[in-house]
Image: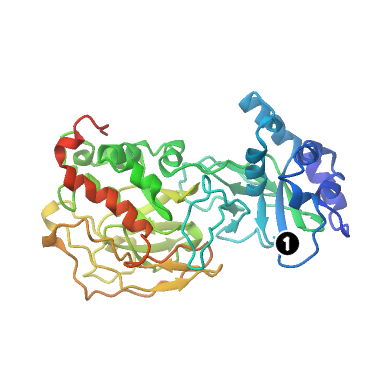
Amino acid sequence: MRHSTIVLHLVAGITVHAQSLLDATARYPQLSDFNELLSSFPDVAANLLANISTGPEQQTVLVPSNEAFDTYRQQNNANISSLSSSDVGNILNYHTLQGALSSSDIQQPSGLISNTALTNSTYANREVPANGGRLSQVVFISTSDTTVGAKIKARQIDALSSADVESGEGNRVSLERTPGNWSGGLFYVVDGFLTLPVNQTDTMTAQNLTSFVLGLNRTNVTEGTNAAKGLTCVCPNNEAFAAMNDLANTNGNVTDGPASLLATLTRHGLTGSYYTTNFTDGDLIQSQNGYPILVTRRNGAIFLNDAQIVGTNFIANTGCVHALDRIMGFLNTTTNITTPANASIYSDTSNIPSPTPVETATTSSASGGAIPTSNATGNQLLPESTAPPTSATSPTADVTGGTEPAAASSTGTTSAAALLLDWYAGIFVLGPAFLTGILVL
């Protein structure tokens, strides 16, 4: 990538007048394969081939280098031009970011979530915004690995010259920070193709969160998890499940009460697409089955109750996946909620508290969407004897950055939480006999 960096630096700042992306990138020999791809698919690349005037339609295009085309060819034993027109269109749309993002825009200390032009429901099936339509898929841009102890597909980043772009399955490519200009906005060179997002469980598997996946299979909720729009799964890693022998035991408690495997998995689901930019220190959010979760940020690390996020922003087609270093403890709401230490783990299952609901409230994200802090249907899994009280309140979350998780609703169209919980609730109706032969941890 050194040659491409030098060339970009030499021509950066050239003023471009009514110049299409094809004409602009023709200046760079290391982008010749990309130019050929655009020319070969004029129908799906029409927006990039046209001269676009400045205004609200400005875009930022991530342009794969010739090196990226070579890597794709080696990994797939085929040229990317052998794909169908629709597949190439989806790939180009995922490489097209909304707005003209300058070098300073992409150097946010906590990273940047950027919406793309990809709206195909196979790859972008997140929340449905209040005004209808469909939310586009996103990428996460970071200039450093801000997650302490992350076990993710990352590389050491030169803080002076490049950034990382994270896409589907948690795969990353490097981005040259000096942009080129075209009439429709800006473009940056990347050293690989972005990965189109897949479903939740395939995303977990790609990041070796296989114990969580097997738990979903064992409780028969895999299909519901993958079908739920606007879902964030914060998955304890395999080591965390291994430390909880009862949950990993074939004969252990699968569905009975708040200490069961099913309840534990549900407690690690959040309604909405929560990226790390959505987690603000002191936020109190609610799990799918009604338990409060305290967000704590300390020295670059993010904790959910007592569990640290050790793998971040794995983009899935319906939301997001993060990895945790342990199974979350239950928040001890009887103490002063200030640190992860206040999130007590109740090892004696008889002491596990009833869920304390977070007061219904929403706050606006930077991009105008609503971040939910309660889940209207999140308590229906709990036995009647452990129904949560209705008087508990929580601090109002101050969420900044990220995209638009949809607020849960108890009326009107079915919410993501209700869809997922319908699958969860079905396990109680079908009974333990249905679980015979299902995959176990």
Colouring method of the image: rainbow
Please give the name of the residue rendered at 18% of the width and 53% of the height, measured from the top-left corner. Answer: 258
Where residue 124 appears, x then y in whole percent? 52, 50
Location of residue 53 (image quadrant): bottom right
31 vs 245, left or right, is: right
For the N terminus, the quadrant is top right
For the C terminus, the quadrant is top left
The amino acid at mark 1 is Gln
Please give the name of the residue rendered at 64% of the width and 40% of the height, measured from the top-left corner. Answer: 86
Image height check: is 196 above or below 385? Answer: above
191 vs 404, left or right, is: right
Any part of residue 398 in sight? no
Any part of residue 213 in sight? yes
Where residue 93 appears, x then y in whole percent? 65, 48
- Secondary structure beneath label 1: loop
Mark 1 Cα shell of 10 Å, populated few (<14), some (14-19), many (≥20): some
Where residue 264 appears, x then y in whole percent? 25, 49
178 vs 422, left or right, is: right
Image height check: is 333 above or below 185? Answer: below
Circle 1 residue: 58
Numbered label tally = 1
Where residue 383 appears, x then y in whole percent? 14, 57
